[in-house]
Amino acid sequence: MTAGPASSRIAVRSGSEGPRLTHRFLPRLAAALCLCAATVAHAQLSLDPPNPTALDTVRLRYAHAGCVNPDSVRVAQESNRITVEVTRGASHASCGNTPGFYEDFSLGRLPAGEYEATLVVVPGASSAEKSGTLVGPLHVSVSQPLMPALAAPQDNYADMWWNPREPGSALYASQSTEKLFLVWVTYDEEGKPTWLAVPGGSWTRDADNHLHYAGKAYRTSGPAWQKPYDSKALRIAPVGTADFIPLDASHALFTYTVDGVSGSKMLERWRF
């Protein structure tokens, strides 16, 4: 709205007998509309988990229509104020058109304290929008954990993990409560498909408070799928160890020592 000269008088009528709203009332109306818009915008943001501790990965959950560009997320923190900036992405049929649709933005693990988180959604290059959208702020209260030495996952890591710069191999993770079952689909020295399984392990935390899930790795072989199953042909051999280290809700480091060879892979969740 553009303000007119001080001497002008603005009036709005609602029907022939409606009340007259002068320019003295308009600031109050604008404030009420802004408050309503802020309330709607605030309702789009929620916290996951709702009551985080210093051991949890804190995420902003943004319920909205449309997509954002997942590679554009930027998180900045100044004192207790956290700002997440993201660029709106191209429209897609599955974005925001299904009940319960949301997108997560990881803030990481925060020390116990009180924070204010704000989301800034910037228009994309193909967007008709001219200015960004400010969502929030949302108050975030992080408490001290009851058991500081607790070694247990605070997230569900069940998914397919891969490195998009190394297509052709992946790490599959299945999770039941705190237990993981990992299968690394890769290739042997001759380029033949193979997989290594980590059917069990245990969680620990290192000095930097990073979770580790480590266990023994096994190589398996068995009867050909074209023939009737023969349990006598099944072979399960221990070949080394593996360690799954979640860095946040969507990125992880996978380290291994297999057949005497050690290495590591940076992984991220597969994006459908």
Image: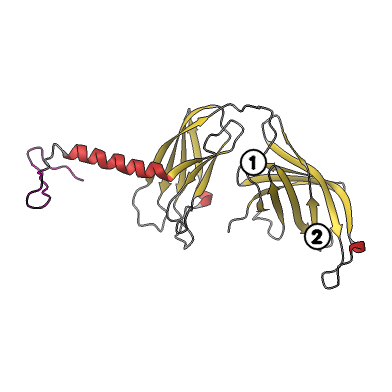
**Which residue lies under the disc numbered 2?**
194
Whole-angstrom CA distance, mark 2 to mark 1, is 26 Å
Span highlighted in magenta in the image: 1-20
Is 15 within the magenta?
yes
Residue 56 to residue 186: above or below: above
Expressed as whole percent of the image width and height from the top left, the position of residue 268 reads 63, 50
Is 44 within the magenta?
no
Front residue of 218/162: it is: 218
How many numbered discs sit on the rendered protein?
Answer: 2
Which residue is painted at 89% across and 60% down in the image?
A: 234
Three-letter amino acid code at disc 1?
Leu
Which residue is painted at 87% across and 49% down in the image?
A: 239
Q: Is residue 196 left or right of residue 132?
A: right
Colour mapping used in the image: secondary structure
Three-letter amino acid code at disc 2?
Thr
Label 2 element class: strand
CB-based contact (under 8 Å), mark 2 and mark 1:
no
**Which residue lies under the disc numbered 1?**
247
Which residue is painted at 15% across and 38% down in the image?
A: 25
Expressed as whole percent of the image width and height from the top left, the position of residue 163 reads 66, 53
Q: Is residue 81 left or right of residue 244?
A: left
